[in-house]
Amino acid sequence: MTVHNPSPPTSDDGWWRSAAIYQVYLRSFADANGDGIGDLAGLRERLPYLRDLGVDALWLTPFYPSPMIDGGYDVADYRDIDPMFGTLTEFDDVIVAAHAIGLRIIVDLVPNHTSNAHPWFQAALAAAPGSLERARYHFAAGRGAAGELPPNDWESIFGGPAWTRLPDGQWYLHLFDSAQPDLNWRNPEVRAEFEDVLRFWLDRGVDGFRIDVAHGMIKAEGLPDVGFGQQTGQRQVELLGKSRLPYFDQDEVHDIYRAWRPILDSYPGGRMAVAEAWAETPQRLARYISPDELHQAFSFDFLDAHWSADSFRKVIDSALAESAVINAPTTWVLSNHDKQRHVTRYGDGPAGLRRARAAALLMLALPGCAYVYQGEELGLPEVLDLPDDLRQDPQYLRTGQSRDGCRVPIPWSGKLAPYGFSPAGSTPSWLPAPDTWRELSVAAQTGVPDSTLELYRTALRIRRTHPALSTAAAQIVWEETRPGILAFTRAAGGTTLTCVVNIGDAPLVSTEYGELLVASTALTREGSGYLIPVDAAAWFERC
Ligand code: GLC
């Protein structure tokens, strides 16, 4: 096997403990070949932008051959690149070019389900009930006199039953779309296959994996009913992260990660894995990041927290307490490709943007690893008014709720859509960018001192170089202050950094925190301090 430049940018094996990781939603990042869809060559061209932004690593959403029913989270071949995105050679080029400028690469692994176009599922369809081919998935007989009812009451996360019936009468399980059949992880062949897939990408030099639906691979023995759902007028998905469903967070799932960890550890340079996992308590979530399992789990409580000092304080304290117990770093996420962008969640328009900028300073000052979703550094809002016929999210087709609005292609430059996303004269981008994004493009914000892009650049630079922020070990100490204000200090190397966020209803005069380093909005002086308006945040330093 050829080893493709596996050398990571630095020799720090614990790099992920305090990294800033940028999520690249590849279809919408940069299109080099002009088909209106982002690709690896486009990403490669834009790597210097990401270096200059000041992030440490990139997480690439799935790029594997796929019918693209769920944006590539329906994988037909785990060891190749979809022609829409490029080739394996282009992938290798991205790794080499990224490493050369100090950026690490994390890839998305989708082990809970394959695409229905995967050769294994095709073989299962062609084989008889009870065959070895079907044993790689969850096939079962239905209930009812003629097996006309699904085997149990499980619901798809995307809406509707989690089972689809085949012409031969058997049903198969899909916790997501019917084009995403769930694998049977009690089958050793499935485990061996994914251990090999891990090695395939590690050999190519990837620095880590984002594990999709990491809590879902093991289903409770006997596939018992939930006993709650459509029959009671509620959706099981509402229980996600609140109580244990028989298809999520089963104890045996941890055996899988205990087998994966030695594989990751057998490669040099600190290869890591981050779990997209939902669990009913922080303690259960923490099990995914035990020292012999994965390295990180996304903190979705932070992603879901409202614009309120109390709600932020609660999730920050709970995440930090948990991480202290297990000595694993926390992760912070404000937006991703599955959630409405936080500018819009925090109120949209100028107020939403002001708050999103303040939230960025809050997140980037916290200890642990910060995930930045492409476009949040530009202050992009959710696109709420996409034409219905262009929406592609399978969840939209099943429930009317669409995640397309946070997946609109990035505006890079120029006065006309798609704003430099594709070369001139290309096919229209797969989702259209609104007119208002002209002012939000990278070119429009570069060098503009009060732009959101420059705010992120400044904050990321300070985060990387300031002694109190660059070490995960510098814990936060909350400052006593009035309701509606979040203020904490981190200290290291003889200097302190204080982050102050005003989520209250009146301006705050800061006098005691030291010298101003950066603020989410222009601050005016007030006596010997500064006036921090409502919905603003600032970092101060004391040496
Ligand atoms: C994860 C992904 C989401 C996808 C789902 C099914 O939640 O983030 O985009 O639809 O898994 O793979």
Image: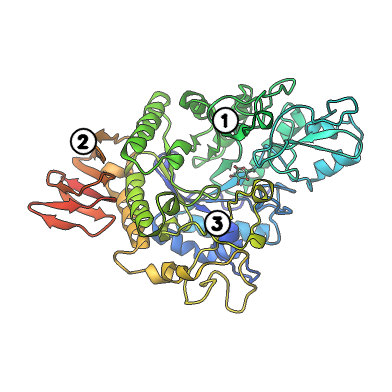
For mark 2, give the secondary structure. loop
Mark 3 surroundings within 10 Å by alpha-carbon count, few (fewer than 14), some (14 through 19), many (20 or more): many
**Front tag of 2 and 3:** 3
Mark closer to the chain start, 2 or 3: 3
Q: Residue at x 16, y 51 (%)?
A: 515
The image quadrant of residue 387 is: bottom right
Q: Which mark is residue 169?
A: none
Mark 1 or mark 3, earlier in chain: 1
231 versus 30 height, above or below = above
- Does 309 appear above or below 538? above
Amino acid carrying label 1: it is Leu
- Mark 3 residue type: Gly
Mark 1 vs mark 3, CA separation in Å: 25 Å
Residue 84: percent from left, percent from top = 68, 62
Q: CA distance from mark 1 to mark 2?
A: 35 Å
What residue sits 58% from the left and 57% below the top?
A: 26
Contact (CB < 8 A) between labels 1 and 2?
A: no
Residue 510, x across and y down, in percent: 15, 47
How far separated are the C-alphas under marks 2 and 3?
38 Å
In front: 86, or 400? 400
Neighbor class of circle 1 (other Cα within 10 Å; few <14, some 14-19, many 20+) is some
Which residue is identified by label 2? 479
Nearer the camera: disc 1 or disc 2:
1
